Amino acid sequence: MSGGVLSPRFANRVAWLLWAGVVALWLAIMLLIALPRSAPGNNLLVLPRVAGSVMLLTTATVGGLLISRRPANPIGWILSVSALVWGFGAFATEYAIYAVVEQPGVLPGGNVAAWLATWMLMPPGFGFLFVLLLFPEGQLPSPHWKPLAVATIVGMAAWTLSVAFPSGLSDTTIFAAASRPSTPIALIISPVLGGLGLAITLAGALMAVLSLFVRMRRATGSEVQQLKWLLFGAICVVCTTVILTLAIQVFGIPLSSPGGLVFGSVAALSFVAIPVCTGIAILRFRLYDIDLIINRSLVYGSVTALLALAFLAFSALAKTLLQPVLGQQTDLVPVIVAVGVAVTFRGVRRRVQAAVDNVLPAREERALFFTDIVGSTELLAQIGDTRWREQLERYRTNVRSELRRFGGAEMHIAGDSFFAAFTDPVRAVRCARALAPRLRGLGIPSRFGIHWGVCEMRGEEVSGLAVWTAARVMATAGPDEIVVSDAIRERVADAAVPMEERGLHQLKGIPGEWRLHAIVATRVPYA
């Protein structure tokens, strides 16, 4: 360490030491869950708890990754420490369930474990509250929020103490038979601490949520995408929680039934979305994919809902019309309706996709690849129409062959100009390096331009300013040259692609100056 800041190597060791501790606790929890239960039905009730334990491992793993990559960001430390405390609390809970409820007296220390279980799961929840308050860069929205953060910490501590040292009121937990520490001072102070701490903590939670809206209003560029990731994770949790509540409260499905266990397990697993989305947002891994995920979620969610409603409506209508004619119920009607609904799926999806794209188009980062024949008009005048058509067909065949080989998607073709998109910038560069000498050997002078940028995805169509930028990058290239933007150079740096800097350029119609580079291609003489 130097200057009071953890060195990256030390932070990395601490991070994975915390992760190893969580894994050890998780293995102990799984061992306790695997022990035989006193009632056969209780063996099924462990399923949601096993599903929930996935959240424990996920939080620890994301926390470890954030610390190792962003040691100065406190969110990684909050997640890792919260996971460790949560692991102790979950272990105490499973231990107490077995030692106090399932098999009393079999394991020692059941009362202590029951006491720990009543309050140790609270701090990790408070940790997630501070993740919201500090997201994404690990700083408060402004210095004015510091008193709120301090007050929230005090409130959380007071509430936790009031639970850990109760006032002697009746215990409504499953550990009611277990004794918990209680002192004369606690009898007086605990109700005050509990009420005040709860009020402050709830106020802090509301302000943490409000801080996200404040950040969203101020955010630009990548920070908007980071906030979208966190919002998407929260939506996943809310949706599954609402579905679970409806299943239990409205449809009367008992939580202990097979259906209730499935809903409960899915709801528990959905909480994994919070740490996963947090990690993606902070590490900025495939950051702009969130727009595509939201777009596709809206499309397929809407299509599923529409087709389900159509199936129910047509089934009811068909039964109403056909049952008087047939004189009895038939299982053939739902089958016919299901086939009809399945046939209309593609058409409905296409229309819903177009509607969603108009309102909320997906946005993704792509390597945008342009190529054309240099001096095509002069070449046409020189060799004539017949030979030009042959050359053009040969050119198109070779370009399409290399695009398929390197995984490029052909977007548009106009005359002798090709526009393609790649998800991997390295493949885009390799495709151009393979094509340039190949076309030169065929006597076809060509040029290439490649740019990495964010573009709108409307169905299969790619559009946006980044597309125009890539076309302008190609316009700066000479015969047999591959010119790329600085964004491409940064993303293929590890591939050791030989490049020559071309300096700053003004691209026609594109604001700002752009640093361009030329890729050194294999020289092949013209055929």
Image (spheres, helix red, strand yellow):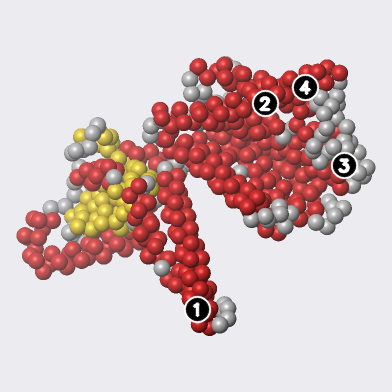
The CA span between labels 1 and 4 is 68 Å
Report which residue position mark 1 lands on: 322
User: If you read the primary sequence from the N terminus, does the residue marked by circle 1 or circle 2 appear first?
Assistant: 2
Q: What amino acid type is highlighted by mark number 1? A: Leu
Contact flag, marks 3 and 2 (Cβ < 8 Å): no
The CA span between labels 3 and 1 is 60 Å
Q: What amino acid type is highlighted by mark number 2? A: Leu
Q: Tag count in the figure?
A: 4
The residue shown at (58%, 21%) is 149
> In this image, 380 relative to 168: left or right?
left
Report which residue position mark 4 lands on: 190
At numbered mark 3, what does the secondary structure look like: helix, strand or loop?
helix
**Dot 2, crowdedness within 10 Å: few (<14), some or many (≥20)?**
many
The quarter of the rendered structure image containing the C terminus is bottom left
Mark in the foreground, 1 or 4: 1
User: If you read the primary sequence from the N terminus, does the residue marked by circle 3 or circle 1 appear first?
Assistant: 3
Residue 158 in the image, given as x and y percentages of width and height: 71, 22
Report which residue position mark 3 lands on: 100
Residue 384 in the image, given as x and y percentages of width and height: 7, 65
